[in-house]
Amino acid sequence: MNSGFTAFTSVHDVPDLAPLLEEALRVKASPLAWSDIGKHKTLGLVFFNSSLRTRLSSQKAAWNLGMHTMVVNVGTESWKLEMHDGAIMDSDTVEHVKEGAAVIGAYSDIIGVRAFASLTDKVADTSEHTLSQFQRYAGKPIVSLESALRHPLQSFADLITIEEIRRLANIQRRPKVVLTWAPHPKALPQAVPNSFAEWMLKADVDLTIAHPEGYELDEAFTRGAVLTHNQDEALQGADFVYAKNWSAFLGDSYGRVLTRDASWTITAAKMRLTNDGKFMHCLPTRRNVEVADEVLDSASSLVIQQAENRVVAAQTVLKRMLDK
Ligand code: SN0
């Protein structure tokens, strides 16, 4: 028996991971087996930030279920939304989220929202301000398409990918999964690593997180993982290497780039430290900064499979919401 979702914004919305994972594998095996359940329903997709995989995979997932989709890019092709209650709107924001979200809600049965961390306003970011304003005012179930703190559809797709490889390689023990910080020219959010950690810590794997000093994530997401500043040590025996850049989280360093240390780039030599490990990244990635061509272009890279599984993850979540 499925338990339907009324929201999907974190792993905490999932009562039990194992049946969800099984359901995803069924969806992947027969993507068009439920092509009627979304008939005459509309998925509204709201983007405050750029997207390639999320934008396309959410639409594809909805179409596989018979749903219609509407996409709006806030600020560039819709009015710039005011997010703060009580604001005096005499500047550049044109429409308040109270109306904006309610209108999108009136046109949609389910709403996906992408709203990255600002990386400048830590209070707003850690309270998931944009996502929660949508939850408050849209009046319809919300799916996170990456919020300030999390990217649950990505983490779910990552879990599906790991499970597929685990079965294929017939790994009976708990696989060793290493999440490693990698260098990047820009300050990026912590959402992907937070979320990946949160999902892996609930899954049947052992998680190690490696990052340079100063890049500690919020321990609410990482408690229970092995934490280290030594990447080489972390990579020993790894079955999966998940590389991702993030900016600093702690204290006054919030949102800052503290180092671009190239010795943290994932190279073929680094991969040789692993247990014939597979390379993972959520994409987009900066080639030869986060990860060397030789790794991305090798047979050990799972990045395209992860991206394919974004459709499966989104479709499984939408299916559960429609089942409700
Ligand atoms: C986003 C992030 O959260 O890190 C989305 C990842 C799914 N990534 C970026 O914004 C990359 C931007 C860049 O310039 O490389």
Image: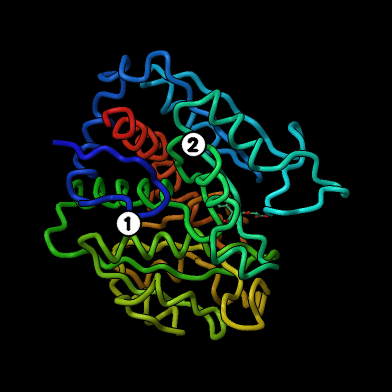
Give the position of the C terminus as an image quadrant. Answer: top left
Q: Which residue is mark 1?
A: 12
- Pick the residue in front: 47 or 103: 103
Residue 90 vs 223, above or below: the answer is: above
Residue 250: percent from left, percent from top: 57, 80
- Give, as a three-letter code, the residue at label 1: His
Q: From this viewpoint, is residue 276 visible?
A: no
Q: Is disc 2 placed on a helix, strand or loop? A: loop
Q: Which mark is residue 89?
A: none
Residue 217: percent from left, percent from top: 49, 75
Indicate which disc, 2 or 1, sits on the residue closer to the N terminus: 1
Residue in view at x 33 percent, y 59 percent = 199
Residue 22 vs 173, above or below: the answer is: above
Residue 218: percent from left, percent from top: 47, 75
The extreme right residue here reads: 90
Q: CA distance from mark 2 to mark 1?
A: 20 Å
- Give, as a three-letter code, the residue at label 2: Gly
Q: Quadrant of ligand 1?
A: bottom right
Q: Is disc 1 placed on a helix, strand or loop? A: helix
Q: From this viewpoint, is residue 75 visible?
A: yes
Residue in view at x 62 percent, y 56 percent = 286
Instruction: Sort mark 1 into few (<14), some (14-19) or many (20+) by Cα contacts within 10 Å.
Output: few
Instruction: Sort mark 2 into few (<14), some (14-19) or many (20+) by Cα contacts within 10 Å.
Output: some
Q: Which residue is mark 2?
A: 139
